[in-house]
Amino acid sequence: MDIKTGFFNLLILGAALLAATILAFGFSQYAFFEDTSYSERLDKISNEGMQLVQLTNEVLLYGEPRALDQWQQQYRDVGLLIEDNSLSSRAELVEILGPLRIRYANLLPLHEKLTQSRDRNADSQLVDIIASQLYQDSSQLQASLRSLKAAADDSLKSAYETVKHRQVIIFSLFTGLVSVYGVFVSLLFRRTILAPLYDLRQTIHSLRDGKAAKAPVHEDDEIGAVCVTFNHLLDEQETVRNQVQLISERFRNIFEQAAVGMSIVSPNGDWLEVNQCLCDILGYERSDFLATNYQAFTLPENLQTDILRVKTILSGELAFDSWETRYRRKDGRPIWARITTTLARDGADSPLYFVTVTEDITERKEADARLLEINRQLEEQATELKRTNADLESFAWVASHDLREPLRMVSSYVGLIKKRLGPELDEDMAQYISYAIEGSKRMDALILGLLDYARIGRRGGTFESVSLADVAQESLLNLSVAIQEEGACVTLLDGLPKVIGDRSELVRLFQNLIGNAIKFHRPDRAPEVSVAFEDKGSEWVLRFSDNGIGIDPDYYEKVFRIFQRLVRKDQYAGTGIGLSICRKIVEHHGGRIWVLSEPGEGSTFFVAFPK
Ligand code: ADP
């Protein structure tokens, strides 16, 4: 039950107590008035009766007409009073009222008799007898009236006694009940209000003393609800405190274990907190920082910039800023640092403190400088390389071009010698001459190859969108004799893509790769060649596969070098320039070329073109 209902019930009980007391008191007063009115009535009968007795005596003595009338009137009045039926029921009056009524009743005939006797001037002796009889009855009535008066007095006295008694009882009962009520109220007050409030105060004191405490919940009432809420708030406060502690611990850990220097600096530049990393960066102890301010370690030439940056943040123009500056370490060595600082403000937007992250970028700065130097050197070397390459190419061009002339001379003169000597030539000599002609032919082929190689990328042909399907067709046309001779089967995958490039170089590339695939076939089977492609997102990858002699994985790289061959020239004709030309063409188009093979089973040459 809640306190409000409890005390409301108490109030009702109190009011009922008061009402009962008032009722009891009212009843007592009512009974008292009843008793006193009864005794007053008796008193009145007695007084009126006494007056009747008195008038009777007067009648007896004087017998005046006025007295007679008065007597009759009085007689009637008394008669009315004593005939009151309510009195007859009173046990204590039975013995008084009976004789009284008889004596009263006797008075009237005697009185009339006496009056008549006197009026008739009857015998005085008879009058006296009647008078004495009347007097006697009157006296007896008087005696009864005295008894009645005594009864009235007794009744009044007893009424007073009774009312006094009743009031004492009511008062005692009231006082007793009020005391019990008071004790009950105070006990209830103590149990439901004082005790819980006292406990609550004790809890608050304990909490103030830093001890863990909970408010005891006595009852499921208003104070109980307050205590439950209080405890709930305590729990929440505890949770919040734990969270705050956790967060501050985390913050401290992050702050302390950060791999960068971290600090908290007051708006006027005093160090408030620094972490170990910053101490390590600058070589000072934590206490050294806290004894000085931010500007103390900055190199004088960087100080002005730092102050300007800080002022910009303080003015609110920027929420945070990051810049590079230089400090002097405790050992005197200057270092480069990147500062990133942000300003914490309070609710009124006033600056509280800066949170600053300091990174030692000395190594990076030095590395940057080294890198710059290396870049510069590389650029120089690249320029030099380009120049040398160009020289080499023009040298190869000129050399191979110019070499062909004397070679042609040698071969034609050897031919003339062979012709002139004709039949005189013995078998050995004829053999030597044919070797010489053969050699110079081969050398010519080599020089032509070299010329081709040198020509790639030199002709300045413009790049355009080229259909590889067309390129493939053209190269097959060029290879038609070889295809026929070897009985080769060449398949092209439909939809070969378009690329940006030099058409004639691309025809050369296809021709070389398909030509090799036909040429290096196994003697026991006809060449089967396929050209396919794959979309690899940023590039097209072409595949040239054959079922030829294959290439040992050790030579995957070597075959692309100039003049490198894996076969004997009497087995497979060639100069060892084709694949190096292919690589040069592919690289000229920004692509890549490589080979995978299973020796004896066949090879696949891959060419990747950027889209
Ligand atoms: P050449 O064809 O004049 O010999 P290349 O530069 O075209 O010169 O080829 C170099 C060498 O690579 C060839 O001598 C041969 O040994 C090997 N080779 C090239 N293509 C193939 C192929 N499809 N199958 C097997 N070997 C190959």
Image: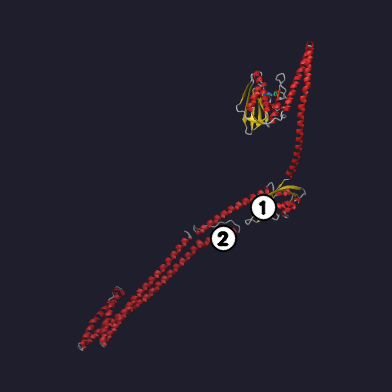
The quarter in which the C terminus is drawn is: top right
**Which amino acid type corresponds to the residue marked 1 in the rendered image?**
Glu
Q: Which mark is residue 202?
A: 2
* Residue 145 visible, this orientation: yes
Q: Position of residue 410 (x, y in %)?
A: 79, 19
Taking 199 as reference, is 294 left or right? right
Taking 104 as reference, is 427 left or right? right
Q: Position of residue 166 (x, y in %)?
A: 39, 72
Q: Under tag 2, what secondary structure?
A: helix
**Which amino acid type corresponds to the residue marked 2 in the rendered image?**
Gln
Q: Position of residue 273 (x, y in %)?
A: 69, 53
Q: Residues within 10 Å of mark 2 (few under 14, many from 20)?
A: some
Q: Is mark 2 within 8 Å of ligand 1?
A: no
Q: Position of residue 407 (x, y in %)?
A: 78, 21
* Residue 601 visible, this orientation: no
Q: Residue furthest top?
A: 423
Please name whichever residue, 291 or 320, is drawn nearer the observer in this view of the structure. 320
Ligand 1 location (quadrant)? top right
When the figure is inspected, residue 412 is found, relative to residue 182, above or below; the finding is above
How many numbered callouts? 2
Taking 7 as reference, is 115 left or right? left
Q: Which of the two discs, 2 and 1, labels the residue nearer the N terminus?
A: 2
Q: Disc 1 marks which residue? A: 317
Please name whichever residue, 22 or 353, is drawn nearer the observer in this view of the structure. 353
Write the residue at 45% across / 68% down: 178
Please name whichever residue, 221 or 236, is drawn nearer the observer in this view of the structure. 236
